[in-house]
Image: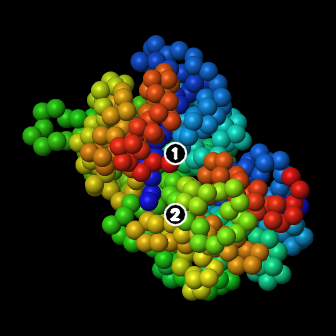
Amino acid sequence: MIAIIDYGAGNLRSVTNALVKLGYQPKVTSEASDVLNANAVIFPGVGAAPDTVRNLRKSGLDDVIRQVIRENRPLLAICVGMQVLLSVTEEYGLNECLGVIPGVVKRLPSGLKVPHMGWNQVKQVTNHPIFNGIADGSNFYFVHSYYAEPDDARVVAGTTEYSVPLCSVLIKDSLIATQFHPEKSGELGLRMYDNFLKMAGVEG
Amino acid sequence: MLTKRIIPCLDVIGGRVVKGTSFTELRDAGDPVEQAAFYYQQGADELVFLDIGATPEGRDTMADVVEGVSEQVFIPLTVGGGLRSIDDMRRMLEAGADKTSINTAAVINHKIITEGAKRFGSQCIVVAIDARRVDDSPEPKWVVCTHGGREPTEIDAIEWAKQAVDCGAGEILLTSWDEDGQQTGYDLELTRTISEAVTVPVIASGGAGNLEHLYEALVTGKADAVLAASIFHYRTYSIREAKEYLAERGIPIRL
């Protein structure tokens, strides 16, 4: 089973549509048991990180996500879903996040158009099956005003230039996180979902 | 490097795409889901759906259209035209839209921008500005028009753009009232002035007649994205042709 975590925000419909298009049957759920029993978990995100953290805590899903990562189950976190995995975010002051990946979520530098909105290239730093069939430097769709800066450079699997080089793909064991939105990134975005689910051993 | 976006716009009434040079000469031009899928296959970077009827019944059918499109098309979708409230916006986002474009409602009540940004995030809130040039002004000056461009106001377009961003707009969709439908090029001075005045991305709209116009809006006008309806509707150029032309001229483009 594929679980898409529903914590009262996020573009669940777009993610669901992308998976259905690929022939999968995801379950949108806020139940801890669903998430913990899933073969693959998708953690989408749209909006503000502090709100997301608050919603997750309220529903207890923060601990569920920590457990999924601790048990090394396949998890794909998207955009704000990625950011809240770090230690703290600068969004609306300094706010604590889930602390799974040590590091800070920073505001994009001034002097740029913010949000960073549109298609930008992802440079692949590592060889990883999540990039199967996706050429190095391919464009993905970004929309964000803050970016994750993990302490450990080894978790950075993809980078994107927007005045600063920012971590656009983060991989640690079975956790994969993207700053861009694969569900809005055309055929290559769909390919990335398919790669993730194939790696997780889910049948389409 | 962040690429410049090419955005076809689909004008919709009653769940059908329409084409026409004026409101009274609209012709049925097909199924929006098919049209959207066609543009998607050609490499459009985003799509904008504009309900030009802007009636309450229109919103119902528009939500159905968005639902259908979002199952087939995996690029960002913006919906505008007649959205009056937070509930209207929510409805479109739940149907599968990624952004909502608000115009008259935002001019009447700025709080809808702030409230929308708070509920859904700034990235969901596009403020559409129809700007009309003031001819007898010593300095270049534009005023905001509401109600689909039919009602000029006294509001300065540049000041309004800045204010909209302060309220929480994540993007500005800027249409030149004077150039819209003329196909003689975007209002470059307007586009550049607003683009330099705000910190969020600006989509230039109104006036595209050829590919050079797109280039000018991106370079001279400093727009982050260009929107066009007619040149793509009438197949004067395909999206791919437009993108190849711009890429050859050194614009960062996703091909």
Q: Which residue is mark 1?
A: B255
Quadrant of the image occupied by residue A98? bottom right
- Check residue A64 in the rendering and tell me which mark sits there, or answer none: none
Outermost left residue: B138
Mark 2 belongs to chain: A
Q: Is residue A86 visible?
A: yes
Within 10 angstroms of label 2, few (less than 14), some, or many (20 or more) residues? many
Within 10 angstroms of label 1, few (less than 14), some, or many (20 or more) residues? some
Q: Residue sitting at 70 percent across and 39 percent down? A: B72
Q: Residue sitting at 45 percent across and 48 percent down? A: B253
The x and y percentages for residue B43 are 56, 40
Residue A18 sits above or below residue A174 on the image: above
Q: Which residue is mark 2?
A: A144
Residue toward you, A24 or B123: A24
Of tags 2 and 1, which is closer to the observer?
1
In the displayed structure image, the side of residue A80 where residue B213 appears, left or right: left
Quadrant of the image occupied by residue A97? bottom right
What amino acid type is highlighted by mark number 1?
Leu
Residue toward you, A79 or B132: A79
Q: Residue sitting at 44 percent across and 35 percent down? A: B242
Q: Is residue B129 visible?
A: no
Residue toward you, B135 or A88: A88
What amino acid type is highlighted by mark number 2?
His
Q: Residue sitting at 59 percent across and 67 percent down? A: A124
Give the CA separation, mark 2 to mark 1. 22 Å
In the displayed structure image, the side of residue B198 where residue B234 appears, left or right: right
